[in-house]
Image (tube, rainbow, N blue to C red):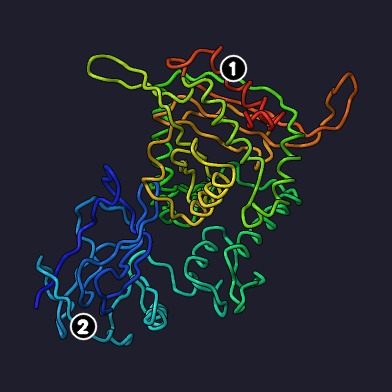
Amino acid sequence: MSTQTFVLPDVGEGLTEAEIVQWRVAPGDTVAVNDVLVEIETAKSLVELPSPFSGTVGELLVAEGDTVDVGAPIITIASGAGVDASSPATVGQSEHGAPAEPADAGEGAVLVGYGTGGHAQSRRRTLRQAQGPGVAPAEERVAASVGVVAKPPIRKLARDLGVDLAVVTPSGPAGEVTREDVVKHASQASVFRNIETPEWGDVREETIPAPARVAPVVAPATPAPDAAGREETIAVKGVRKATSSAMVQSAYSAPHVSVWTDVDATRTMELVKRLKASPDFADIRVSPLLIMARAVIWAARRTPMVNAAWVDAEGGAEIRVRRYVNLGIAAATPRGLLVPNIKDAQDLSMRELAKALEKLTLTAREGKTSPADQQGGTITITNIGVFGMDAGTPIINPGESGIVALGTIRQKPWVVDGEVRPRFVTTVAGSFDHRVIDGDGMSRFIADVASILEEPALLLD
């Protein structure tokens, strides 16, 4: 009999640290090889770590919310039946015998999290009696989902989107809440978010709280009497830390220049309407972003430098021109900004690209975007129109030379053949690395994108 220590592995290229988000096991639980032990958050992704050992969980060495370095011990697992879970941790070989029954919830173990599967009920019951360091009461974590039928990924999506499952109308065949139910409820709630204008309060400044996955707020140790309750400090970690580092690196290393133009996107809206009615797209979500993606791919082929990259090499700087498009889509998620990309998007048909965009969006919303899906991008689209914005000057994603912003599409008066008519109008903006591409090249590229939005039939060429 032996006790193994599981250390934090490098789950992504170059990972140096990760945050412990949620333990899926507790001391005394029995685990088998490949059972999920813990959910961690790296710089860009939520990752579930499976157990390389079988046996009984001994000690959780790190509390939820803590950030640990790769290689640091995080949990001990005792192999074999009857092993004392509190025995000192030593590195040994796993024994793949039949798992023993889990320890009873009333044996006094201090639980730091609850898991899934057959033992979830006992863990939740114990959490109401005992908490580990920095862990919220179980009632706070599951109150919104008591009595609601929903799978664990759906519950997690609801937590991330701030949706109370108790008020969501289920549409599943067995009366369960589906992913579409949660997303629809969140979308409807956002429509009414700003109907009432709040009164000006006494607080002069505040910091918007980070998403639920970010570490708890840390208040000043000895706040001044007049500062009590007026300020809060939020640790910068995870996605926010990675995003801030990447944006600063890009802004101060690549000379940014932006251009933009207004576009009559009426025919794009007509095409979207036809695609939605087409049987070939019956099971796929279609939006103007699909036409925008096709336009960017088409235009990048005509102006390849916008799809290139500046590379600092030993013998001097180089410009690497890519003859493929790994199309990045900036996604605002409950965890922060992610930029996953669709590999070799230039080879996809309209239907295949629509499916890829839908999968990318759902995966990002659920926080399941892998590090590999966020690496190797060549050019990015940011759809600021979903926030009601007309235009912007986006910052280039590191490793790329161009980024395109699609503004909101709304009806405006537009001159057509000498007459003012109502048309669907949007603004297409683009920022580019002036080391790689000059103004005339980026202007041609944006003009090409605008041409496709004005007349999607050009894609038939």
Q: Earlier in the sequence, mark 1 or mark 2?
A: 2
Q: Residue furthest right?
A: 419
Residue 223 rendering spot, x and y as whole percentages = 44, 49
Q: Residue furthest front?
A: 461
Would residue 424 be seen by someone viewing this image from the given angle? yes
Task: Give the left or right position of residue 143, taking residue 309 as reference.
Answer: right
Residue sitting nearer the eye, 218 or 299 = 299
Residue 59 rendering spot, x and y as whole percentages = 22, 71
Q: SS for tag 2?
A: loop
Residue 122 rendering spot, x and y as whole percentages = 38, 83
Residue 7 rendering spot, x and y as whole percentages = 20, 59
**In the picture, which quadrant includes the N terminus?**
bottom left
Crowdedness near tag 1: few (<14), some (14–19) or many (≥20) residues, C-alpha within 10 Å: some
Residue positioned 21% across, 74% down in the render:
54
- Tell me the number on the disc at residue 7: none
Task: Give the left or right position of residue 165, taking residue 327 as reference.
Answer: right
Residue sitting nearer the eye, 233 or 87 = 87
**451 vs 167: above or below:** above
Crowdedness near tag 2: few (<14), some (14–19) or many (≥20) residues, C-alpha within 10 Å: few
Residue positioned 72% across, 28% down in the render:
454
**In the picture, which quadrant includes the C terminus?**
top right
Amino acid type, label 1: Arg
Amino acid type, label 2: Ala
Q: SS for tag 1?
A: helix
Residue that mark 2 sits on: 98
Residue that mark 1 sits on: 444
Residue sitting nearer the eye, 5 or 269 = 269
